[in-house]
Amino acid sequence: MEPAEIEFLAENELIEIVPNFHHGPMHLLCGTFGPFEPAVQMQVPLWLALALRTKQRCRITPPDWLSVESLAELKEREESEQLFTPVSSPHFREIASLLLQHAPEDVPHSERVRGLIKDIWDLRMSKLRLSFQLFLNSDAASARLTHLTRMEIYTMRAFLTKSLDQVFKLRHSDKTVPALAAEQVAASNARTRRAAAAAAAASAASSSRGGAAGSSGVSQ
């Protein structure tokens, strides 16, 4: 799955808005939303919230996890635990990036939030690289990681597949070299045996010719 496809899925996540206009229900492929009433909070897909916000038709209410307090707590857990910690949304980075890009004024302490999101992402990427390194250095045939997001998997997918290809080639070569060496030794032994057999045959033939000549001299 490509980043654009992952972001598309993130834009279908529901988010709360406060409209400033009157409108009847909107019948969309993803569901029916509305009616829209001024100052009445409601949920809509993120892509619709961003479109309305761009036209100044609503105010977006950020999710609870997109606050300095919640993100600071998540960062602290990521720093203290070796394993990946569960995140509030599988699209936390994409949703945060879209809101900070298109509606930063609706996100309290947006710059601090932006920094915390980056710190959490860097911590999780560091854990992911370390996990892959430990797996590649081991003889394990499989590994299991939990609480990863789609974007994190995509980010490391190319690196992991290339690394696994290299590991497979190295392990295959380690098994092939001894096999080739054994074949070469066997071939050398066969050549030695053939040479010894040829020498013995030649010696026997020479002895036979000498014996025949001696017999001829005696009879004369």
Image (cartoon, rainbow, N blue to C red):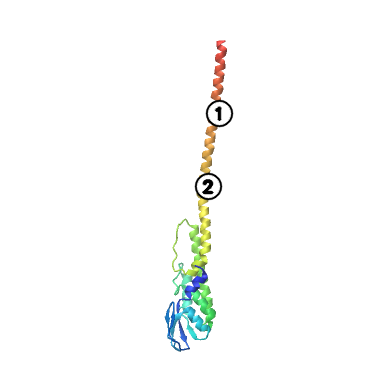
Q: Assign the C terminus to one quadrant of the image.
A: top right
Using the image, determine if residue 48 lies above or below residue 212.
below
Taking the view exactly as shown, the residue that stands out farthest to the top is 220
Q: Mark 1: which secondary structure?
A: helix
Q: Position of residue 90 (x, y in %)?
A: 45, 72
Q: Is residue 143 left or right of residue 101?
A: left
Using the image, determine if residue 165 lies above or below residue 22.
above
* Residue 199: numbered disc: 1
**Residue 107 visible within the image:** no
Within 10 angstroms of label 1, few (less than 14), some, or many (20 or more) residues? few
In this view, the residue in front, 77 or 61, is 61
Q: Position of residue 138 (x, y in %)?
A: 48, 57
User: On the image, numbered disc 2 is attached to which residue?
Assistant: 177
- Please state which amino acid type lies under the numbered disc 1: Ala
Q: Mark 2: which secondary structure?
A: helix
Within 10 angstroms of label 2, few (less than 14), some, or many (20 or more) residues? few
Q: Residue at x 55, y 17 (%)?
A: 212
- Please state which amino acid type lies under the numbered disc 2: Val
The quarter holding residue 33 reads bottom left
Q: Position of residue 96 (x, y in %)?
A: 50, 77
Q: Residue at x 49, y 73 (%)?
A: 8
Using the image, determine if residue 21 lies above or below residue 164.
below
Q: Earlier in the sequence, mark 1 or mark 2?
A: 2
Q: Calculate the distance from the C-alpha at mark 1 to the C-alpha at mark 2.
A: 33 Å
Q: Position of residue 48 (x, y in %)?
A: 48, 80
